[in-house]
Image (cartoon, coloured by chain):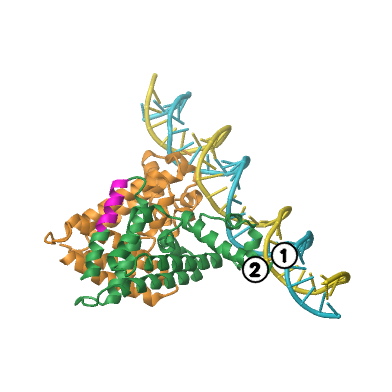
Chain colours: A orange, B green, C yellow, D cyan
Amino acid sequence: VKVTKEKASENRRELVRAAGRLFRQHGINGVGVADVGKAAGLTHGAVYARFPSKQALAAEALAEGTRQIVALMRSSVAHPTIEDYLDFSLCKRSRDNLAGGCPLTASGSEIARQGKIVSRAFAEGFEELARAIQEVLSDDSDYATVRERALTIAAAEIGTLIIARAVARAAPRLSDEILTASRRVLGEIGGE
Amino acid sequence: VKVTKEKASENRRELVRAAGRLFRQHGINGVGVADVGKAAGLTHGAVYARFPSKQALAAEALAEGTRQIVALMRSSVAHPTIEDYLDFSLCKRSRDNLAGGCPLTASGSEIARQGKIVSRAFAEGFEELARAIQEVLSDDSDYATVRERALTIAAAEIGTLIIARAVARAAPRLSDEILTASRRVLGEIGGE
DNA sequence: TGTACATCAGTGAACGCGCGTTCACTGATGTAC
DNA sequence: TGTACATCAGTGAACGCGCGTTCACTGATGTAC
């Protein structure tokens, strides 16, 4: 069942897209290779024709997903400030949209237990996010460099979203409170 | 093979302890019920004689583990400041000690996919951590309440550790840099 | 204190199921003539 | 432009394995006499 070269590379792209969506929703370990294949209208065999392993697919899906969400954040408003970025990331819509959100947040604590290729993709994705944040920070702080503040805000954003999601079902009030608090306090770091 | 009542409750405690250690190290979904039983010197059947499900065991292990690490942090120095807490949490020792560390950090993004009992245990654990932090914060900020700053610092600490661990294998330099940056910047929020 | 026996902590086989990966195969594509 | 055939994208059976949970059973404990 060979297919057109165009169809083949579209299938490959679709596999990465489906993998990203499913891995974000259910975690990397919570999704089978067959599930990814099926979501792309293919079988698990098609995955192994394109990727050497599930890890390789996960790494590519992580990289692609991060690139997309950072691009979306960058273009969310015309001349974004750190407050715009915080509003974009730390809101209920973002919290409740696991499948369409940031892979760094969706898979965070899972990464330490994945292979080195996944860790590498994660590190590069995090650097990209931190760079985007750094570009909108003012440079006039006297206690920390822009890079230090950008790294801290990036990590804090991810932590905030992870916690807000973790407690959402059992303590929805607390979840909202955390989002609001972080948006406010991190805004102060960024605005100084 | 009935055992002494004392031995029985010691076995139960040991199951919770072993579960906590293993779940932190490999993730909740990365450890089987049989693994937990074996680590406590028992079989998987013994787990089900004591806990209605793996979820219930995970919830109890999460609660117990958080209680212990917060207590340890509180008593790490005589009259702790926020800087002491940050030094305690955001260091290489802490990052590299997955099994002995904080369950909130080890399981963070996994929790949104667990049952409600696990989410509840997580929420209570996070409240405990935030309360401990709040107690060492000064009250003289004009832009945010102590509670807001405590919630933000707690979430940021967890996010920082998760990222530092995720990138540790592929980008050790970046991992160290993140720890240092967060310790510095979060200290400023706490000290204002 | 000694004996008989009910209790129940813990055992281990069995359940149905899904996992990642391999590989012999299929059949449409696209190329060589 | 038409035909023959090599290529290779994708299929699906099979591999060995581990999962959470149930349940009939075992045998030491601890109680009633």
- In depth, the one of B46 and B72 nearer the eye is B72
Q: Quadrant where the C terminus of chain A lies?
A: bottom left
Name the outermost residue toward the left: A140
Whether residue B59 is visible, yes or no, is yes
**Chain ID for label 2?**
B
- Residue count near mark 2 (Cα–Cα under 10 Å), binned few <14, some 14–19, many ≥20: few
Instruction: Please rate how many residues cluster around mark 1, counting C-alpha atoms within 10 Å: few if below 14, some from 14 to 19, many from 20.
Output: few
Q: Secondary structure at mark 2?
A: helix
Instruction: Name which residue type carries label 1.
Output: Lys
Residue B2's disc number? 1
Q: CA distance from mark 1 to mark 2?
A: 12 Å
Which amino acid lies under the numbered mark 2 shown in the image of this protein? Glu
Up-down: is A43 above or below A156? above
Q: Measured from the top left, where is residue B167 in percent x and y? A: 34, 50
Question: In terms of depth relative to the viewer, which is nearer, B36 or B96?
Answer: B96
C28 over D2 or under it: above or below: below
For residue A118: magenta? no
Q: Is residue B159 visible?
A: no
- The part of the chain drawn in magenta is B171-181
Task: Find out whether residue B173 is within the magenta segment.
Answer: yes
1 and 2 marks on the same chain: yes
- Quarter of image, res A49: top left
In the image, what residue occupies the spot 30% across and 64% down? B84
Residue, disc 2: B6
Q: Is residue D33 left or right of residue C25?
A: right
Quarter residue B44 falls in: bottom right
What x and y, as percent, mark residue B32? 57, 56
Q: Position of residue A110 (x, y in %)?
A: 42, 55
Residue B97 x, y percent position in the rendering: 42, 54
Magenta stretch, main secondary structure class: helix
- Residue at disc 1, secondary structure: loop
